Amino acid sequence: MKYKESYTVELKRVLNTDFKKEIIAFANCDGGEIYVGVDDNGEVIGIDNVEKTMEAIGNMIRDEIKPDLTAYTNIEEIKENDLSIVHVTVLRGTKRPYHFTDKGLKPTGVFVRHGISSVPATDEMIREMLRESGGIAFDKSRCINQELTFNYAEKFFSDSDVAFGEPQKRSLGLIDADGYYTNAGLLLSDQCEHSIKCAVYEGTGKTKFKTRKEYNGSILKQMTEAYEFISLSNNLNSTFDGLKRVEHPDYPEFALREALINSIVHRDYDYSGSIIVNIFDDRIEFVSLGGLVKGITIDDIKNGISQSRNIIIANIFYRLKLIESYGTGIKRIVETYQDQLLQPVFNPATASFAVTLPKMINKIDDNMSDRDKVLTVFNAKDKVTRKDIETHLKCSKSVAVKLLNTLIKDGLIKKIGEARAVVYTIK
């Protein structure tokens, strides 16, 4: 049999509404051929009006399928036993997934070949095609949802005196060269599917929490609302410089702001999980999905080296003056703690990156009494070991034991545990 349906061959008696589906399926897979005027059993029956059929197929390809497939298709007439049939060749496209213009990037509009049939693509298939055609960067790839609104982003850009019309959306990378919204557009849109989750815990562990909040919508909205929530836990404390009252917060505002923005700009949005912010009595943790970009170490970042996985988002935040310059965030967080007893901790893992900001406790002043020096360590840590006192006071074991025993005798601290497991806490 000369004509037989297969993974790369489709036979049609006449031109029908399913014809577009076959073209899309071939373009999304390995290409193929469609013969119009041939029965399913391979019998050539021909068609009457070849010119009209070819014109209708051309119109379908140009007007009802996106992105443009014209360059990847060929339509011709061939003769079989004095009968005319139309032969359509479809090549594998480079801007997959191809879809019905009126359906968009949904399973109802995207088709693939499965055996000798053309079937709807799953959401995961569509995402995979988008990743392959759009490159590695999530924010540059076409977005599955093309029905986006930007109510919050428009107001945010307006308040920042930055234009946000159609031309700007294209130049910023929210709309690609083919007129599709990118995933960067999705992240700034009101339909953003990711979120930030904040939790406040009682004490220094996760045994008991006080309150939880989850923020959705545009990442600009999430950033604003999450920062407002975090700021509620940044209490002001008062000290006196002579007769002058001096107020200082528990955490440097810049460090809080930078840690939050970094978790939004640099996270891996291929993961569907949320950014996590955990607030404890003695620290705040920011946990974002995605480890360090390949080839970059934590020492590189501390030295100011920057390699963003979301270049479009980073550029937009720079345009909005939310970040001042690339690669300075973590370095400046460290600088805000330079006079503090406890330092920020940066913990990169395979699929996550955590930043822990401790409450600010000034470094031990050499002019302090030994008693005040020890109490400063207790103000900085929930549980203190003898070794902590030796390290921070630069004293011997015997001196540390003597100071701790004095505070126990005065009823200020208590001893917990035995032998090497001994720790001390505020009584």
Image: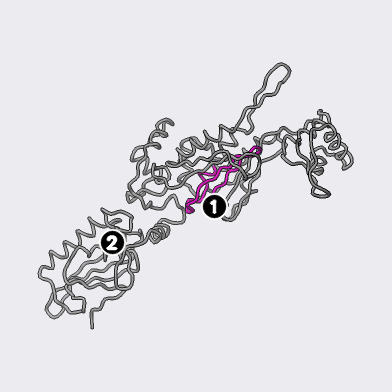
- What is the x, y in percent for residue 334? 65, 39
* Residue 209, percent from left and from top: 59, 41
Q: Which of marks 2 and 1 is nearer the N terminus?
A: 2
Which kind of residue does numbered mark 2 sit on? Ala
Residue 240, picture quadrant: top right
Which residue is pictured at 57% across the width and 40% down the height? 259
Q: Name the residue that disc number 2 marks.
A: 71
- Nearest the viewer among 383 and 238 is 383
Residue 338 seen in this snapshot: yes
Along the horizontal axis of the image, is 326 left or right of 16? right
Q: Is residue 173 at least partly visible in the picture?
A: no
Helix, strand, or loop for circle 1? loop
Q: Say whether residue 97 is magenta.
A: no
- The colour scheme used here is one colour
Residue 246 coordinates in the image, percent (x, y): 67, 22
> Which residue matches tag 1?
290
Q: Which span of residues is magenta-colored?
A: 262-288
Q: What residue type is labelled 1?
A: Gly
- The residue positioned 54% from the left and 50% from the top of the image is 289
Q: Image quadrant for the C terminus?
A: top right
